[in-house]
Image: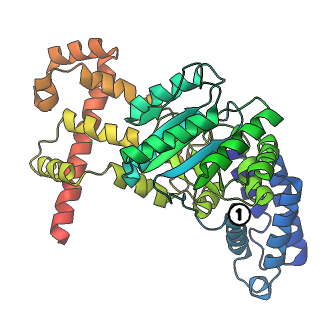
Amino acid sequence: MFDNLSERLERSFKILKGEGRITEINVAETVKDIRKALLEADVNYKTAKQFTDRVKEKAMGQNVINAVRPGQLMIKITHDELAELMGGETQEINLKGSPAVILMSGLQGSGKTTFASKLANYLQTKKGKKVMLVACDVYRPAAIEQLRVLGEQIGAKVFSRQDSDISNQPVKIAQEAIAEARKMGYDVVIVDTAGRLAVDEQMMNEIAAIKNAIEPSETLFVVDAMTGQDAVNTAKEFNDRLDFDGVVLTKLDGDARGGAALSIRTVVNKPIKFIGTGEKMEALDVFHPARMADRILGMGDVVSLVERAQEQYDEEEARRISKKIAKNQFDFNDFMGQLSQIKKMGSMKELMGMIPGMDKALKGVEVSDDAFKPIEAMINSMTPAERANPALLNGSRKNRIAKGAGVTIVELNRFIKQFEQTSKMMRKVQQMSGKRR
């Protein structure tokens, strides 16, 4: 999402590249360019001006003026101010209460229902909570069914009412759900509410009534990051009526300019708590302002990458693979297992963006999640014996596998060679690691 802003900011910092020291003139020129970059990214004008004024004020400080590398210090100042602009500290979700009640709000199409399910999945898998989802959107015909399907997908209970005498009473549905959750020992209740295509009085009155009736521990406003400044304006209207606790930005993996993410915290003075980064139920991240500033400035996000890898890390499986590598027994089944773990970490484009400098290195290169499909097709076209023992792959077997996978013999041979080289490299790394001990 922030690709264009990252490029523009990089160009802004080049104004100071090679300068011996910071002066009022070159700072003014750099700051002016930064402001243009922010405005082009659809950042609120007032927010952009306040931001660049703070950057300029800090850049003209005595310690910075005397600095040997003014360009690097300007990047540091901009990074710190970007992080502060987006909230400074990471804000955790409030789960007080028995059960804790989370109320979802936002316009139709912002991704509330999908996010509610992602949040339930996050709380179940990462926080060990027992979660109930509540379908209070009684106006959109498919909303209840959508929540039910997503609930089944992640193994969460979905509470709904479709009988005629209650289907138009969201407040009562929410109250009944919380009462049942308390009786059944649920830790968290997530209430999905109705949205509209635009803010209207009926919607605002209804969600305000639900909030007053259930007194949630957390009210989240879900906003589509692709809608730019409209998202910021809508957030302000909702906050004026609901006084919500935090913001959720969905579709942050899209191609919008990113202005909403940078403006919304300043305009409504509420923290961004989560970001949606894809379609999968696992594509949900806690929002870390400093890490997002890193990514905007092309520094990657190694901490988040490591955290995702650790989530998929199975210590027992790692020991098993390590033994097989040491005995030169690493096979295609093991390889497929490793691919599966990588895919669970997120989209390839997103993962590449977390590696410092990789965005620039892959500029103009399309990184597709389909890259693994030919490899998976080749392995799936092998017999169980062939997957377990790569040495069995002779000419006739390769011909059969290539036809089954829809690839050429050249492509299959290339993959087998890469697999063999990878196995050798892993064995060498393991041996070197053993010697160091």
Q: Is residue 128 left or right of residue 78?
A: left
Query: Residue 145: x and y, percent?
Result: 51, 22
Mark 1 secondary-structure assignment: helix
- Mark 1 Cα-neighbour bin, 10 Å: few <14, some 14–19, many ≥20: many
Instruction: Give the residue number, with chain letter if any, for mark 1.
Output: 82
- In the depicted view, which residue is nearer to us: 152 or 226? 152
The quadrant of the image that shows the C terminus is bottom left
Q: Position of residue 425 (x, y in %)?
A: 24, 50
- Is residue 256 or residue 201 the one in the foreground? 201
Q: Please, which residue is most extreme toward the front here?
A: 165
- Identify residue type, mark 1: Leu
Q: Residue at x 35, y 55 (%)?
A: 310
With respect to residue 68, does 229 lie above or below?
Answer: above
Which residue shows up at 20% across the image and 55% down it? Answer: 428
Q: Quadrant of residue 127?
A: bottom left
Question: Whole-percent x and y of residue 396?
Answer: 16, 14
The residue that appears at 73% across and 63% down in the rendered structure is 85
Q: Is residue 90 above or below residue 385?
A: below
Q: Where 64 sits versus 351, above or below?
A: below
Left or right of 113 in this view: 195? right
